[in-house]
Image (cartoon, grey):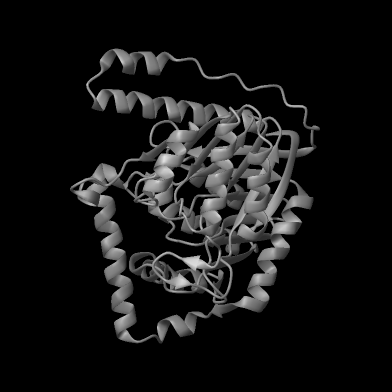
Amino acid sequence: MRRDHTVVLLQSGAQYFPALIAAIDASVTEVRFETYIFHFDDVGVQVAQALEGAAKRGVAVFLVMDGIGTPVVPPEWIQRFDDAGVFWHRFSPLGTFGLLIPGRWRRMHRKLCVVDAAVLFCGGINVLDDLFELGHGAQTTPRFDFAVRVTGSLVSESHHAMVQFWQRLLVTRQLERGNLVAARRALHKPAKPAPHSDLPQGHVAASLVLRDNVRNRRSIERVYRQAIAHAKQEVLISNAYFLPGAKLRRALVHATKRGVKVRLLLQGKYEYFMQFHTTKAFYQSLTRAGVEIYEYRAGYLHAKVAVIDGRWATVGSSNLDPLSLLLAREANVVVDDAGFASGLHAALCKAISSQSVRIEEQAMGGRPLLQKCKDKVAYLLMRLTLFLTGKDY
């Protein structure tokens, strides 16, 4: 973890999108952008226009959207991207049989943007209006989520990973077309070197943690478990879809036994059946062990962040659930800096104190039988999904 970074915390779209668009508008050589959801609402159109404008200026623009998170691209924008010279791709569309094919569960879930190989944006924020929730419509409270803007040495790591991913997409496309020669050329095409950055060097220690299905299958979960194992005072985690595996649950329980204060800020509004009810299946055992659980009720919570002992912090795209930790491509930035951690900690504490409800062990035990049955059914569905994909959790 090198100490040469500047890291700026961005809370929700109100801070994230202006910073992102300003960076794209100022780009001179290259923009690489990956997102799970690219929704062409008012916010999405602003981002799309920035990418289009950069490409028209001669900037090399590469855009990857997930095929489930972004099921369609409007015909108007297909034409506009193509006319401007934007290189864009929808990763692994569902096709005829959809999620019945186990391999289709492996998604591109990370939210990364690297501009001129010098500035990185990473977090949990999709290209989607804060006041609109897919499947639930317009909202009155902005989505609770975070991202970071980073300069420093880890940007080159992200740039390299995104270049490699794009090259693999090219290889896969050529292989699907039966063009082995073109696939071989794409595989060996050298990565574009990162241009020298004139941005001032920072002093914050930070690192990039990627999760994929090859070399980094357990990387993000391992980083969480190690940080929790070394916690001495406090563990504060906020996560949209919290379905932790046995090792991660044990780490949280062991922390409470050492006298560490463990607090979880989780989704309090119903979004998806399996995630909502499976999470409840873990509540009683965790609260019995001394873990404090709070449900965010003001709006939809989409954060994937943590602060430990007022210094270690992470912001990224990875939920603490099987889909993120076992199947999806994810990206988190880990920061070791008291100043950065204090800002994130303050935002989470404010949400806990004024916008959340604490879940008590007695309340979980006294819930109606129907709700408990839904929790069990959701948990069994989750286990069945993992069995079909060949994963052990």
Q: With 3 as the anchor, is 169 left or right in this view?
A: left
Residue 76, compared with residue 262, is above or below; it is above
Q: Residue at x 72, y 53 (%)?
A: 341
Query: Where on the picture, by quarter, is residue 166?
Result: top left
Residue 76 screen position, x and y as percent: 41, 47
Q: Residue at x 52, y 61 (%)?
A: 302
Residue 261 screen position, x and y as percent: 65, 65
Query: Where on the picture, by quarter, is residue 214?
Result: top left
Residue 393 screen position, x and y as percent: 35, 51
Residue 188 visible in the picture = yes
Residue 29 screen position, x and y as percent: 62, 26
Seen from the viewer's position, the closer of residues 194 and 293 is: 194
Seen from the viewer's position, the closer of residues 122 and 228 is: 122
Residue 87 visible in the picture = no
Total marks shown come to 0
Residue 138, compared with residue 317, is above or below; it is below
Q: With 102 as the anchor, is 117 left or right in this view?
A: right
Residue 131, compared with residue 175, is above or below; it is below
Q: Residue at x 75, y 34 (%)?
A: 3
Seen from the viewer's position, the closer of residues 225 and 303 is: 303
Seen from the viewer's position, the closer of residues 5 and 25 is: 25
Q: With 44 as the anchor, is 172 left or right in this view?
A: left
Which quadrant holds the N terminus? top right
Q: Residue at x 40, y 69 (%)?
A: 276
